Amino acid sequence: MISRTTIPDRCAHSALIPLLAACVCFPMACGEGGAPPPSSGSESAAPAASTDPEGVVVDIDLDEYNILMNAVMPAGRVTLALANRGFEEHNLLFVVLESDSTVWETERRLSPGERRTVTLDLEAGKYRAVCDFSGHEGRGMLVEFSVEEKTPTGAGPDR
């Protein structure tokens, strides 16, 4: 006959209460349980990537230590759908390669799990997207991309 030790039901339930309380309280203490702080300017929480019916939506995912985005964006009005998929805070800035000048950057860092949309106008050219928060750029969190003029659909070379 095999002997096994069991925990009485009343002890098992009382042992779960502190564990459950920790699971509920820990995310709140880390800032994940409340609403994100309000933002100003053209940045807003991103409910969905299709928030701009007039322009183009570009998805950009930030993760340790990668920026995932298309290599080409259209010039003009674009809506960036930013998502921090990592466990660290991230920011994002766009630098013109030719002049090494910053033309746009997030107003505040994105918290882990945060989504945000930003609408801006980009001129054609070569850019670098960079997260320069806490040494992330030195760990490879940068990517080059191009912004190209839109061509009308069906347009081709003159014959």
Image (tube, helix red, strand yellow):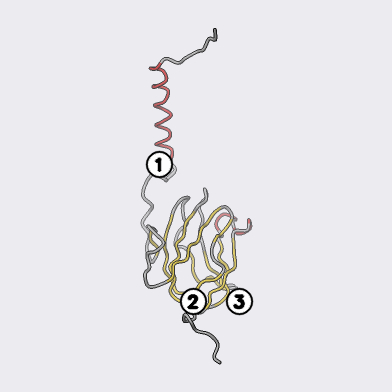
Quarter occupied by the N terminus: top right
Q: Residues within 10 Å of mark 3 (few under 14, many from 20)?
A: few
Q: Residue 56, position in %: x, y?
A: 44, 70
Q: Give the secondary structure at mark 1.
A: helix
Nearer the observer, 158 or 109: 158
Q: Residue 139, position in %: x, y?
A: 63, 56
Report which residue position mark 2 lands on: 75
Work out which residue is located at the far top of the displayed protein and give it. Answer: 1
Name the amino acid, label 3: Glu
Name the amino acid, label 1: Met
Q: What residue lies at 47% left-to-right and 66% top-to-bottom?
A: 58
Q: What residue lies at 49% left-to-right and 81% top-to-bottom?
A: 151
Which-is-in-front pick, marks 3 and 2? 2
Q: Is residue 121 left or right of residue 132?
A: left
Q: Which numbered tag is attached to residue 28?
A: 1
Which-is-in-front pick, marks 1 and 2? 2
Structural distance between the alpha carbons of marks 1 and 2: 41 Å
Report which residue position mark 3 lands on: 98
Q: Residue 158, position in %: x, y?
A: 54, 91
Comes first in the chain, label 1 or label 2: 1
Mark 1 and mark 2 in contact? Answer it, CB < 8 Å.
no
